[in-house]
Image: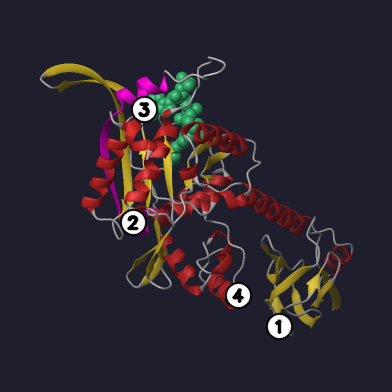
Amino acid sequence: MTSTKILVPDMGDFKDVEIIEVLVKEGQQVNKNDSLITLESDKSSVEVPSTHKGTVEKINIKVGNKVNQGDLILSLKSENKTEEKKVAVNKDKKIEKRVEDKKQEVIEKKQIIPTAPSSQSVTKSASPKVRKFARELGANVLEITGSQRAGRVSEEDVKNFIRSQVAVSGGKVEKKIHKEEYPHEEFGEIELKDIPRVKKLSGPQLVRSWTEIPHVTQHEEIDITEMEQFRSSLYDYYSGEMIKVTPLAFISKALVSALKTFPNFNASIDPIHNKIIYKKYFHLGFAVDTPHGLMVPKVRNVDQMSIKQIGEALKKTSKLCRELKIDKKEFFGGSMTISSLGGIGGTFFTPIINPPEVAILGVGKSFDKLIKLKGKIVSRKILPISLSYDHRIIDGAEGARFCVYLSECLGKDFAFKLAV
Ligand code: CAO
């Protein structure tokens, strides 16, 4: 029997990190890789695993202590001498890899917030009791959206997360894993690849939105013929050059006008106090397709912008996303999101609401359509839109009125409607 010292491993740039949880007791038997303590910085939390198997002899730290690499966590009574030598030099590759993975995860979470769900996926803190509760249920607090101040995770958040992840069957909680009757390789050659991290992060949030929010999607064809004629005739008064603004800038302007008229769409549910939060600001979220995955940054105070300024803000924000230079906070605090596939193609689809927002506007590619107007068959430019809304807050009639209002804002009298 020898005493083995377990030290705080290399944590990269993380210094003076607070211990928020001690997960073992003196006299307790631990296995290699069992978590010993939880460290929490302002960016994330990390569990430090044991490098050895043994019995906890003496714990050298306590909750609230701030530690750095090399600080003594505890000593273990251990039987394996050869392994102990490795600990002394603190070269356990697995720990380094786990810490490295965690650092990478923190960096990516800091930079990338996926769609809906997404977005609001980075959890900063939770009490030791809540962490223990989450761990017992097999959940990672980092994946849970915190509903409390500064995104802190509560026990209720953990329960909601678990509810969205599992199905209750026969009184037992089981993970929903569907096993295919025949393996894919039985039908030909296949290739296995990891799911990209951004998609892994956004997945649970999408499931939460889809399973917890009663979605209704209403489709509408908007006649934007006059608006499109106007858009393609825009030029700079002084230089005479054409001004390139995409339809999205006009749609954003119309959406702000609709949000002012229908405040239920610029709202969020406060699940703790069971109230509706009405937002007095107009920060629109835009789904941006980037090589790193889908991101939904917000453009702030769109109500105070001209159409040209909205177009510029859109270009600037999507560039920041594509270059991973956008600040994390810009993924939060939105009124409503627009998911425009108009630059790519397709007509109607069912966009998934980006909680805590209560509605999302999907935009398809405009197309020419022959329609009967005043007894004549004429060709008109049609914009397909799909509005998804949370039926707990918005009734079907209100959803329909919202679409009609948007049609008017982008229709033949758009110049009067959008100027208001
Ligand atoms: N109908 C017809 N043409 C449209 C259109 C529409 N509804 N919307 C855009 N276009 C045209 C633009 O005018 C532009 O034409 P030009 O090249 O002739 O100028 C072209 O399509 C490309 O536009 P864009 O997509 O670059 O610009 P945008 O302002 O419309 O959109 C942005 C900006 C950031 C939203 C977009 O680049 C993007 O990332 N879209 C994908 C969003 C997405 O993935 N949503 C799905 C989320 S759910 O998984």
Q: Residues within 10 Å of mark 3 (few under 14, many from 20)?
A: some
Marks 3, 1: nearer the viewer:
3
Outermost top residue:
240
Q: CA distance from mark 3 to mark 1?
A: 62 Å
Q: CA distance from mark 4 to mark 3?
A: 48 Å
Contact between labelled residues 1 and 3, with CB atoms less than 8 Å apart? no
In the rendered view, tell whether residue 137 sits above or below residue 418: below
Q: Residues within 10 Å of mark 4 (few under 14, many from 20)?
A: some
Mark closest to the chain's N terminus, 4 or 2: 4
Residue on which the image places disc 1: 25
Residue on which the image places disc 3: 365
Residue 229 percent location from the top left of the image? 36, 20
Residue flagged by tag 4: what amino acid is it? Ser
Q: CA distance from mark 1 to mark 4?
A: 19 Å
Q: Is residue 216 magenta?
A: yes
Residue 262 percent location from the top left of the image? 32, 52
Mark closest to the chain's N terminus, 2 or 1: 1
Residue flagged by tag 2: what amino acid is it? Asn
Q: Is residue 357 magenta?
A: no
Find the magenta span and give its range: 210-232
